[in-house]
């Protein structure tokens, strides 16, 4: 289990299905397409990958673009979105939507199929594997006579730190 967070961001809805196994990295760092063709990483793609590797919290495409500019990279916002969407399709980044509808991204900390427990106040995220969830999803699909089923599970709550901070604020307001 690993944790990551996003101070000040409230995540509420998962938006990308598990597609981690559809494409893979080649030995030279390029990306392999579904047809097995290697797509070599561009200078911009490598810069975006480095920023994602350095981030521990969820960030918007605009945040990532600003960080690229801060580091001296000339990468357009459209290019950032395009690369983030490709990485999401490949299962290389986790993607969530904030209550305002913003899409936020971060590098997956776990390579295998996993789920997220997310603080609705600070965005702190705990990645976990859920064998019980897997068995339940298979049982429901089987009972409904569905095949080739996939799922995402995002569990929202309040982390200890935010719960303590909220309780402290309430106590401070009391006469």
Image (cartoon, rainbow, N blue to C red):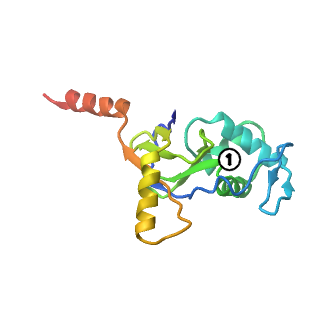
Question: Is 61 left, or right, of 147 in this rendering?
Answer: right
Q: What residue do we see at 49% from left, 47% from top? A: 115
Task: Please determine whether, in this image, residue 35 is positioned above or below residue 11.
Answer: below
Q: Which element type, helix, strand or loop, lies under badge 1?
A: helix
Placement of 17 over or under 119, stated as above or below? below
Identify the residue at image location x=63%, y=48%. Answer: 93
Residue 60 percent location from the top left of the image: 58, 49
Q: How many labels does the image show?
A: 1
Image coordinates for residue 84, horizontal then vertical, percent: 67, 53
> Which quarter of the figure has residue 141?
bottom left
- Provide residue 125's location: percent of width, then percent of height: 48, 39
Q: Is residue 10 visible?
A: no
Instruction: State whether residue 81 appears in this view.
Output: yes
Q: Is residue 36 left or right of residue 139?
A: right
Please rate how many residues cluster around mark 1, counting C-alpha atoms within 10 Å: few if below 14, some from 14 to 19, many from 20: many
Residue drawn at (66%, 58%) of the image:
89
* Residue at the limit of the structure toward the bottom, as seen here: 145
The C terminus - image quarter: top left
Residue 145 rendering spot, x and y as whole percentages: 46, 72
The residue lying toward the viewer, choosing from 129 and 142, is 142
Q: In which quarter of the image is residue 21?
A: bottom right
Determine which residue is flagged by label 1. 65
Q: Quadrant of residue 164?
A: top left
Q: Nearer the viewer, residue 167 or 155?
A: 155
User: What residue is drawn where x is 79% and y is 59%?
Assistant: 33
- Against 159, residue 132 (above or below) is below
Q: Which of 57 and 145 is in front in this view?
A: 145
In this view, which residue lies farthest toward the left?
A: 175
- In the shown orientation, is residue 6 left or right of residue 74? left
């Amino acid at each position: 289990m690993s944790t990551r967070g996003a101070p000040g961001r409230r995540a509420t809805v998962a938006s990308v299905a598990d597609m981690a196994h559809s494409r893979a990295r080649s030995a030279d760092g390029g990306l392999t397409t579904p047809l097995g063709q290697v797509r070599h990483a561009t200078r911009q793609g490598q810069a975006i990958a480095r920023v994602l590797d350095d981030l521990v919290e969820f960030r918007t495409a605009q945040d990532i673009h600003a960080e690229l500019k801060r580091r001296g990279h000339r990468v357009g916002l459209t290019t950032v979105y395009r690369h983030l969407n490709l990485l999401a399709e490949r299962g290389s980044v986790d993607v969530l939507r904030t209550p305002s509808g913003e899409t936020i991204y971060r590098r997956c900390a776990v390579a295998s199929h996993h789920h997220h427990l997310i603080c609705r106040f600070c965005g702190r995220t705990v990645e976990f594997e859920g064998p019980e969830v897997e068995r339940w999803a298979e049982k429901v699909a089987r009972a409904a006579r569905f095949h080739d089923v996939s799922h995402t599970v995002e569990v929202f709550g309040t982390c200890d730190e935010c719960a303590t901070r909220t309780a402290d604020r309430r106590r401070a307001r009391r006469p």
